[in-house]
């Protein structure tokens, strides 16, 4: 497929058209044949594999083990936890027939696996010796969304879901916060996305949780994205599924639980965040291709030295430096190649033309700034790792500045409404914590509570909307 | 959970009871709440992760990329290839309702992904430049089996499915054979399972294939297990899905395709093959725990030296040797620990008692032979890798001898029937290659054609059953 800049929608004009366009043109994904489904293509999937690799290392070092539970959940299981079934009912896909027969009990395709996992936990957990039980699974999930959006909202998506059971509430909370911290690291350190850490309001929390901890990020259009969540489930599920253990004093107690998930939705946030009018920009740490080497052949002025041997020497040197490097030696024109790899967001392009060959230099072009640097090839090999690290930091710093610029302390509801109608962004405002008041704000401004920041302090104030006394400033925003 | 030898069924008495028993007791898997489903527990899943790691390396080095396609397939897609839909129809699970509404077209949960993948291939492949297209996905699969069996036959299982498209039939066949060779390596080199490589008969081949290549193994009860298959699909699917490309001469042609899969079913074969009355025996290369260190404390005769420091030194030395080692310092009795780790099939147990501590020795106990060796601890550290390799080979040699002993050249149908009624095993016999004759043999002896071995030679003979002329000796056997 040819990449032509003029075909690509501008990010600055209409972000959602631009986004769909780059996801398709960079070959991250394609629309599946069934409404709301998506095919994750190799270039997009490679990023997910990197996330899996990083996150799997984090959880395993904390003693979490991977397992696999069945995808089909008896409908009756979902109904056991009242809030849980209410939260998920509208989004369920249901298998009614199998093996040529109508099933006695319909099976729900997992929208999340608390119920099926905890029915097994009840069988396995008997004593404090069986705790903590620390499991995770990588799997597909189905939630039948009405309005879908590539990566960000699809009827089927991939994720990891961690599920743990503990002997005390303190231990469970501390584990939920550990997952929260892992997610922060994924976004900040790998995706170069600054995030807000906080707790969800009762309305916005996970259906069945005691407390939901969230990692919230801000997209370029001023809307918030819930990037990943971890839940302190209290004893809500252990009580309905009967996960009981005998403690050291031989007393029976219900287990304290957590669950936490990170999905391919996060990749949508990554793509939206860094791209520009020329396409995707991938942070070096997660880019499947970090460096593309593009030889520029000229039929008019042949190089004095053997250009292809020189190009190959450079390519091999990068390979042995552990750089994820691609050599584009196709017969496309240099212009076409530049457009293609810019669209795909490759952090650094190395151009090697006749002049570079004769001088034994190379030209580095940086995807985020467009800046060019020509240097001796040996120097480039030595500096490439630092250049990638510098770009990783540059991307994060740029987003930090953006987040700061678009986070506002507001004290009047007029100002609140005005910002939500214009630039959007995140608003910090006193709120009375009443669900009815929260709903009115949402109806009037499309803004929901995103979170109560973890580092919040108690203050005296009045609710931005109803004027009643309030003790904390919450974060509001319109969301994806 | 306590492991008590007397609770465990004997492999020699009734293999299927023994098998279910060890799968549950070794905590490889558990029954799921829905009939025919299974939970893969961490100990079993770790083996699958090892398989994924090994196989992913093999396919990536051949240029295959991972991707992810939707699980739900429109019913109409499956119907496009006549043999394909006939083969899979009785086993389908069907989603009829989603998002609270009845779907206009029912969705089938993938029993394999040819149809959904190839509908996308048709969109992506236009020119010879787009070929070969080499994709793989790791995912869950649903086939609604009537009689289920842990790992070996479950309604949902995990697998990898590779799907490729090529510009010529020769190239496609050679890729299908490449996959065939990868599977041979997995079974022989990692699972210590000798296998037969061959082609399937028309009756037994994949529904929609031109030729199916199979890797067949023999289980301890004399039944055959189809361990993994790769298919030359010819142009069967490309013609119905319209995967057309312009070749170098600008002529339009349909792509030539392959598909190939390895599933968690293979783990069932692994567990069945090597275990004994005391439980599982895992080949060192795929064992999640290769060595377990068991300190034997005695309250009567305390060691002169610091026993726990000595145990820890040994443990740490093994860790730094890259051995997958576990220290069992629980307060269970040594006997209980021995039983537990024997049940779990850990290749080598290292016992460290008072005498070992005082002498600075350790005692190695080998899971397959029960043999014990006491040696200075430094020597054990140096030899551990060789000992693991030696066990890996020993397990393979033992199975090779078993396979040889239970493979028979037969020339009379009486003999054929007698063996199938008694010891079973694999039979090599002339067959006329008529499907009707094949069916009669199956009805009379429960034996099916397993494969035509790859190294077969044309000969003159008469069919074992009908007496008509035959040119090749096929492998027959009863199968899982």
Image: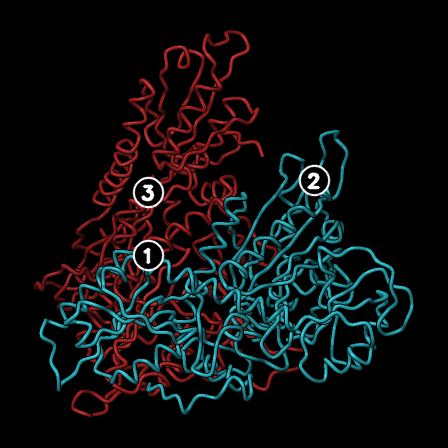
Chain colours: A cyan, B red
Q: Do pointers 2 and 1 mark residues of a single chain?
A: no
Q: Is residue B450 in view?
A: no
- What residue lies at 59% left-to-right and 71% top-to-bottom? A402
Q: Which residue is mark 3?
A: B285
**In the picture shown, does residue B250 fall above or below A372?**
below
Chain letter of the residue carrying label 1: B
Q: Do pointers 3 and 1 mark residues of a single chain?
A: yes
Residue A221, image x and y in percent?
60, 79
Which numbered disc covers residue B55? 1
Q: Are marks 2 and 1 in contact (CB under 8 Å)?
A: no
Disc 3 vs disc 2: which is toward the camera?
A: 2
Q: Are marks 3 and 1 in contact (CB under 8 Å)?
A: no
* Left or right of B424 on screen, residue A465: right
**In the picture shown, does residue B228 fall above or below B382?**
below
Element on which disc 1 rests: helix
Chain letter of the residue carrying label 2: A
* Left or right of A111 on screen, residue B57: left
Element on which disc 3 rests: loop
- What residue lies at 63% left-to-right and 41% top-to-bottom? A132
Residue B186, image x and y in percent?
29, 52
Q: Quadrant of residue A44?
A: bottom left
Element on which disc 2 rests: loop
Question: How far is mark 3 from mark 1, CA to CA?
Answer: 13 Å
> The N terminus of chain B lies in which quarter of the figure?
top right
Q: Which residue is mark 2?
A: A167
């Amino acid at each position: 497929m040819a990449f032509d800049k003029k075909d690509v929608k501008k990010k600055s004009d209409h972000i959602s058209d631009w986004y769909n366009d780059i996801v398709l043109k960079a070959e991250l994904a394609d629309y599946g044949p069934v409404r709301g489904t998506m095919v994750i293509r190799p270039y997009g999937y490679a990023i997910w594999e990197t996330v899996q690799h990083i996150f799997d290392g984090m959880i395993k070092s904390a003693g979490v083990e991977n397992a696999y539970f069945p995808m089909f959940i008896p409908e009756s299981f979902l109904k056991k936890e009242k809030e849980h079934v209410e939260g998920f009912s509208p989004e369920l896909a249901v298998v009614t027939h199998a093996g040529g027969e109508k099933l006695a009990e319909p099976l729900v395709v997992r929208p999340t696996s608390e119920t099926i996992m905890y029915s097994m936990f009840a069988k396995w957990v008997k004593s404090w010796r069986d705790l903590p039980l620390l499991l995770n699974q990588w799997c597909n999930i189905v939630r039948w969304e009405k309005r879908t959006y590539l990566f960000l909202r699809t009827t089927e998506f991939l994720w990891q879901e961690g599920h743990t059971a503990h002997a005390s509430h303190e231990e469970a909370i501390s584990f939920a916060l550990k997952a929260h911290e892992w997610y922060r690291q994924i976004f900040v350190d790998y995706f170069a996305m600054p995030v807000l850490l906080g707790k969800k309001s009762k309305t916005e929390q996970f259906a069945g949780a005691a407390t939901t901890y969230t990692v919230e990020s801000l997209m370029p259009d001023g809307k918030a994205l819930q990037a990943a969540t971890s839940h302190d489930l209290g004893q809500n599920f252990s009580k309905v599924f009967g996960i009981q253990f005998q403690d050291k004093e031989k007393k029976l107690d219900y287990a304290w639980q957590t669950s936490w998930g990170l999905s391919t939705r996060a990749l949508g946030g990554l793509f939206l965040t860094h791209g520009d009018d020329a396409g995707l920009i991938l942070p070096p740490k997660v880019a499947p291709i970090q460096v593309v080497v593009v030889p520029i052949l000229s039929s008019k002025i042949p190089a004095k030295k053997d250009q292809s041997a020189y190009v190959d020497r450079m390519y091999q040197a990068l390979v042995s430096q552990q750089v994820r490097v691609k050599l584009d030696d196709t017969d496309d024109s240099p212009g076409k190649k530049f457009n293609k790899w810019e669209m795909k967001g490759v952090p650094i392009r190395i151009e090697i033309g006749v002049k570079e060959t004769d001088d034994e230099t190379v030209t580095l072009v940086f995807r985020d700034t467009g800046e060019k640097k020509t240097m001796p090839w040996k120097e480039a090999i030595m500096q490439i790792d630092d250049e990638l690290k510098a770009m990783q930091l540059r991307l994060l710093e740029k987003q930090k500045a953006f987040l700061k610029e678009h986070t506002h302390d507001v004290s009047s509801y007029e100002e609140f409404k005005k910002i939500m109608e214009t630039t959007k962004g995140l608003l910090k405002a006193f709120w009375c914590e009443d669900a009815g008041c929260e709903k009115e704000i949402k109806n009037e401004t499309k803004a929901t509570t995103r979170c109560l920041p973890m580092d919040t302090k108690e203050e005296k104030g009045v609710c931005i909307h109803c004027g009643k006394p309030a003790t904390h400033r919450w974060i509001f925003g319109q969301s994806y």
